[in-house]
Image (cartoon, helix red, strand yellow):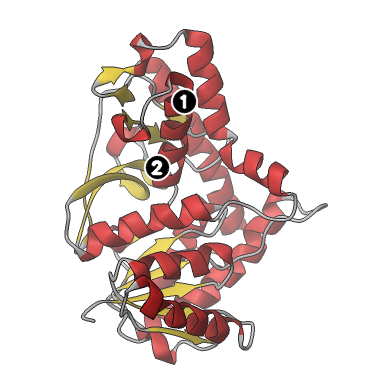
């Protein structure tokens, strides 16, 4: 195939992303992980599914980065989950170290690629990837808003008993407790959900969206979400490789938009072959702008911790 996608991290999110990309025949795929044999085994398993599923994408696994050379897109899912007794800052610094190593290798072998960050804490990890790679911000961004919007749409459809295909939802801000689901801009077949649901139900749906990842972690007990995250990043990959000019919410480096500068925050962007081609600004109420600023402040706190520990982000 003409396109090549590398997925770094062979866990559930990474492997399922590789599967989705291959099944859609968007690109040949290289799956990278530090565990010897694991990415090779998963890649072979996916390759052997091709005759049944009817895809011809090449899929390979590797413990090094030479095989990733010349990638068009690199998805970074590598990182540690938060463990009992581990503070947010502990997780931040451990994953920043992993991201630094991964990005150094990716920039060396694929200096013209687009980087999509999925590792958590996502917005902060985007800063690390941008700093280490030296890439322009249009080519380094994060998958979060697509996932958060998908969760929002799901809960709206469940509440109203309508097809999820008729729901459209809007989420701004950082990926986490301070995200800003915008009910005014979320619709069902063009009708704002503020006209279809009472305020208390709207607030319950907004809160469930914010807690979407935690809800799944609580249910699984020994893992976290991977089907929806992999679907979200695959939608971004497809928009880029097919130059769709698709408007999707991504963690993007704002440079004055929404009154926020030099910070990765979720916002709607146009995705095409060159990466982020435009950041869309929508009109916000005073309350919405304040909520977005609070979300940005949370990202800034993480960025400050990184700087205090030697990361020139």
Q: Check disc 1 and report its element: helix, strand or loop.
A: helix
Extreme residue toward the front, this view: 52
* Residue 23: quarter of image: bottom left
Query: Is 230 drawn above or below residue 150 in the view shown?
Result: below
Give the residue drawn at x 48%, y 29%: 155
- Label 1 crowd bin: few (<14), some (14–19), many (20+), radius 10 Å: some
Q: Which mark is residue 266?
A: 2
- Decide which of 219, 140 is in the foreground and name it: 219
- Label 2 crowd bin: few (<14), some (14–19), many (20+), radius 10 Å: many
* Residue 248: quarter of image: top left
Which residue position holds label 1?
Answer: 291
Distance from the alpha carbon under mark 2 to that under mark 1: 13 Å
Query: Is 1 drawn above or below residue 130 in the view shown?
Result: below
Left/right placement of residue 95 relative to residue 281 reads right
Query: Quarter holding the N terminus?
Result: bottom left
Left/right placement of residue 205 relative to residue 89 reads left
Give the residue drawn at x 43%, y 26%: 156
Total marks placed: 2
Q: Tell me where residue 298 appears, x and y as whole percent.
A: 55, 39
Query: Is 102 drawn above or below residue 306 in the view shown?
Result: below
């Amino acid at each position: 195939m003409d396109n090549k996608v590398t997925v770094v991290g062979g866990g559930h999110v990474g492997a399922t992303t590789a599967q989705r990309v291959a099944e859609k025949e968007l690109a040949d795929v290289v799956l990278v992980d530090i565990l010897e044999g694991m990415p090779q085994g998963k890649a072979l398993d996916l390759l052997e599914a091709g005759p049944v599923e009817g895809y011809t994408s090449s899929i390979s696994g590797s413990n090094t980065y030479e095989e990733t050379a010349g990638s068009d897109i690199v998805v970074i899912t590598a990182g540690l989950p938060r463990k009992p007794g581990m503070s947010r800052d502990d997780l931040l610094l451990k994953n920043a170290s992993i991201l630094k190593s991964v990005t150094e290798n990716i920039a060396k072998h694929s200096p013209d690629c687009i980087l999509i960050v999925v590792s958590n804490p996502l917005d902060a990890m985007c800063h690390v990837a941008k700093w280490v790679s030296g890439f322009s911000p249009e080519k380094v961004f994060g998958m979060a808003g697509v996932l958060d919007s998908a969760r929002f749409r799901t809960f709206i459809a469940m509440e109203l008993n309508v097809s999820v295909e008729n729901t459209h939802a809007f989420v701004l801000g950082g990926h986490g407790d301070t995200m800003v689901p915008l009910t005014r801009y979320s619709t069902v077949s063009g009708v704002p959900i503020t006209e279809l649901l009472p305020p208390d139900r709207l607030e319950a749906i907004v809160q469930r969206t914010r807690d979407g990842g935690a809800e799944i972690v609580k249910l699984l007990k020994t893992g976290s979400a991977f089907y929806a995250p992999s679907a979200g990043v695959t939608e971004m990959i497809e928009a880029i490789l097919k130059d769709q000019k698709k408007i999707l919410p991504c963690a993007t480096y704002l440079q004055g938009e929404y009154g926020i500068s030099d910070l990765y925050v979720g916002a709607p962007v146009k995705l095409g072959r060159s990466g982020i081609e435009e950041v869309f600004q929508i009109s916000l109420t005073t309350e919405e702008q304040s909520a977005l600023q609070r979300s940005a402040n949370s990202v800034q706190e993480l960025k400050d911790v990184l700087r205090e520990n030697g990361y020139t982000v």
